[in-house]
Amino acid sequence: MRKSYIIRFFLIALFLLAASAASFAQVRIGISVGFAPPALPVYEQPICPAEGYIWTPGYWAWGPAGYYWVPGVWVQPPTVGLLWTPGYWGFAGGVYGWHAGYWGPHVGFYGGVNYGFGYGGVGFCGGTWRGGVFAYNGAVANFGGVHVTNVYVDRTIVNQTTIVNVNHTSFNGPGGIDRQPGAEEMRYANERHVEATPNQVQHQNFASQDRSQLASVNHGRPATAAMANVGAYRQVAQQHAQSQPISEADRSAGRSYNPNNREANQDQRVANGLRSGQMTSGEAARADRTQSRIDQQVHNDRAANGGKLTGQERQQINGEQNAASRQIYNEKHNANTVRPNAVDNREANQQQRTAQGLRSGQETSGEAARTNRNQAGVDQQVHNDRTANGGALNRQQKTQVNREQNQNSRQIYNQKHNNNTAKPKPQGRGGR
């Protein structure tokens, strides 16, 4: 009897050890997904619970029910002198891969993603270690009524290390943040790193069980964007999990793949190029025509296959989108630039509205094909008029372009509010 009890106890211990290892593996092991994570939600930083805590920003993680938001939270570092490098999603090879965060003596590369609150895309400006004590930058950290003795204010470093991210893009690569690691960041990558603490792992695990954090449920607006500490969120997550657990229908919806996300990313990149002046109207016209052809091809393939794309068709579309992505990149980084202006901003607004319609499913690929085709015509007309007039539009040409843009705007509105919607299809996988 005693021997049987000991064996049973030993097996239980092994099971718990394996479960603990699996929890850590969730943070260490990379994940690859076939579609982009949602944009970063806008939220306020909770008050720091006590001295010695370091802010770790929220992020989109991937689980059995798709993307879910892990709330930003104040945590204690594993040891004095270590700083947190956030994880990030990076697009490469046709998939979005997760690069896990870690603790180290310096903050390394995290994709250039502006997570806010000191993580502006480059390094960390929220505080620094001084003589074994963490000093907080009052220009970034939220103390509320908490007494903190080691405080300084440095707004210059905040401005120097912040990457403008007006669209709150959450990933690095084509269609997202266009940034590569610098020399220092590459050197920091070879330093001694410590993986996420058990508290951080538990925090992510609780978020994965909270239905209100699922992107498929909250549509990019998580119920809990940030918490003051791990323990406070644990109670919230457990209450949510008990009152409304994640169902199999939630898992199916969360794993859904919407090929329109890739199309939307390209439209958004054209919009960004027009606003910044990195793309001329002529270059935008070429990009719009290319995207229109791809959108139409997706529409035709779906129509021929009962609303779905075959594996071969997805591979073909992905190859064409990669070529289109390189075209946009090259045009944004050549010597052709224009001063940002109202006409190009109007063109950019139309592109962004199409991107939003594709992401939300309010616009189908066929509808986006028509929109991009019309926009290409307007962009080309603007380019031709500017070329004929020494780079400027006269009043009559501006009036004509504005009238055509109004027509395009009504078309986009009507397409986003009719009964045609794009239903997402399953996709997504995990791996090293």
Image (cartoon, grey):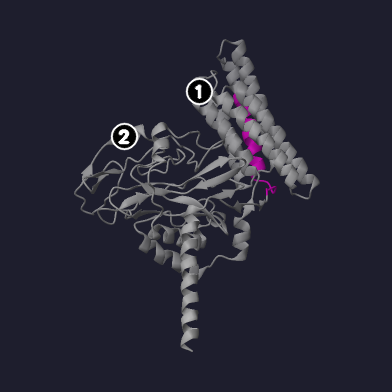
Task: Give the numbered dot on residue 388.
Answer: none
Which of the two marks, 2 or 1, is nearer to us in this view?
2
Mark 1 residue crowding within 10 angstroms, few (<14) / some (14–19) / many (20+): few
Check the image and report above or below for 98 versus 372.
Answer: below
What residue do we see at 40% from left, 54% from top?
196
Disc 2 secondary structure class:
helix
Q: What stretch is highlighted in magenta?
A: 402-422
Q: What residue type is labelled 1?
A: Asn
Q: x, y percentage for residue 290?
A: 68, 30
Q: x, y percentage for residue 292?
A: 69, 33
Which residue is identified by label 2? 157
Q: Which amino acid does label 2 sit on?
A: Ile
Which residue is identified by label 1? 341
**Is residue 349 visible to us here?**
no
Q: In terms of secondary structure, what is the magenta stretch mainly?
A: helix
In magenta segment, residue 44: no
Label 2 or label 1, whichever comes before in sequence order:
2
Kindly give the residue lying farthest to the front in the view shown. 3
What residue do we see at 52% from left, 47% from top?
98
In magenta segment, residue 421: yes
* Marks 2/1: CA–CA distance: 30 Å
Q: x, y percentage for residue 121?
A: 41, 38
Q: Is residue 5 left or right of residue 231?
A: right
Say which of 371 and 394 sits in front: 371
Q: Is residue 306 left or right of residue 230?
A: right
